[in-house]
Image (cartoon, rainbow, N blue to C red):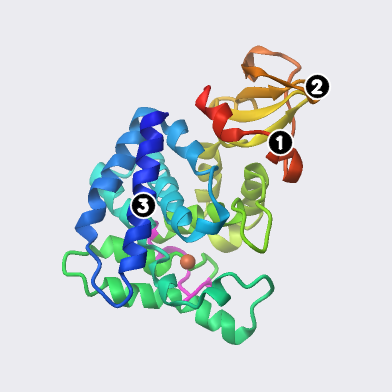
Amino acid sequence: MPRARTTYAETFEHVKDLMQDARGGAVDLAASQPYIEAIIKSLGRNGDALLSLTKLRRCDKYAYTHSVNVAIFSVAYAHYLGLPENKLHLVGLAGLFHDFGKIFIPQAILDAPRKLTSAERDIMQAHVLLGYNHLVKEKDIRPEVLQGVMQHHEKYNGSGYPNRLRGSKISIYGLILSLSDHYDALSSKRVYKEPMPANVALAVMYKMREEAWAPGYVERFIKMMGVYPVGTPVLLSNGERGAVCHSNPEYPTLPKVMIALNPAGRPVPPRLRDLREHPGLDIERSLTGNDAEMLDVGMLLSHA
Ligand SMILES: [Fe+2]
């Protein structure tokens, strides 16, 4: 967990620097390689540790945490799908740079606390081409990275943008990026919206499956994340509250939970409940708003 924390923090600082420095200038893609390498290694050591850190996002730093999180989810999912290691690097880079074009979009549009007008939506959607046009100038950039960036808002039924690609015209890179991007966007807090609990975000994505993604891909994404992904604050059926700290892939609804509050709502020293070992005890629901904020998820995960 401490090593995963270092990997996350260093990648975050790297993304912040590259997005702040990049306006107008060149992007040094090679400089990002060691960070992707560290993400791949960290996921290989303990996938839950790095994935759990994506839950500790800071709303005011969304542009940076979102890029790091999408890179992490994309690499994890590409690995889950069986892509070879050299492709994991490309997926990771595409994740870090997928929304690069947003550095050219006015902050007032990025953070607008309301529905965008159609003119504003056009400007917002231009981030894909703006990012692509900037990155394509890099001499060593690989086509897979550009595909991921260019296709992360395309949809299986052809209703996406910018090229309204349909079906198999969308590459595996676009597909992986789109799933990771949706999941992080839905489950993140923004200035204009509360975060969706991770299990609710996955349920919303499942409903979108026919329009948005090739058959079977969202199902596998959910299987990888677990029905209650690591870091989800939950209420157990006995009234205890805590955070999911390990998934049980064979029993996706029965993860390990680190308990913080007893049924009376009083704090208790963190203790681990493996729901597989407690017949009859299960997750009542995920927690939101104040109920979720009463739990220090970061502290609980550090005990896992
Ligand atoms: Fe985007």
- Callout 2 amino acid: Pro
Q: Secondary structure at mark 2?
A: loop
Q: Kindly identify the residue that appears in the image at 36 percent across and 62 percent down.
A: 97
* Mark 2: C-beta under 8 Å from nearest atom of ligand 1: no
Q: Which of the 4 quarters of the picture holds residue 41?
A: top left
Residue 136 at x, y = what percent? 26, 73
Q: Is residue 91 visible?
A: no
Tag 3 near tag 1, CB within 8 Å = no
Q: Earlier in the sequence, mark 2 or mark 3?
A: 3
Residue 294 image label: 1
Report the side of 38 relative to 300 (left or right).
left
Report the magenta stretch's main SS: loop
How far apart are the alpha carbons under marks 2 and 3? 40 Å
Q: Which residues are magenta?
A: 158-173
Q: Kindly identify the residue that appears in the image at 54 percent across and 49 percent down.
A: 218
Q: Secondary structure at mark 3?
A: helix
Q: Secondary structure at mark 1?
A: loop
Q: Is residue 9 above or below residue 178?
A: above
Q: Residues within 10 Å of mark 3 (few under 14, many from 20)?
A: some
Q: Toward the viewer: 87 or 284?
A: 284
- Callout 1 amino acid: Met
Q: Toward the viewer: 145 or 184?
A: 184
Report the side of 52 relative to 147 (left or right).
right
Q: Earlier in the sequence, mark 2 or mark 1?
A: 2
Which quadrant is the N terminus positioned in? top left
Residue at the disc numbered 2: 263
Q: Kindly identify the residue that appears in the image at 16 percent across and 69 percent down.
A: 139
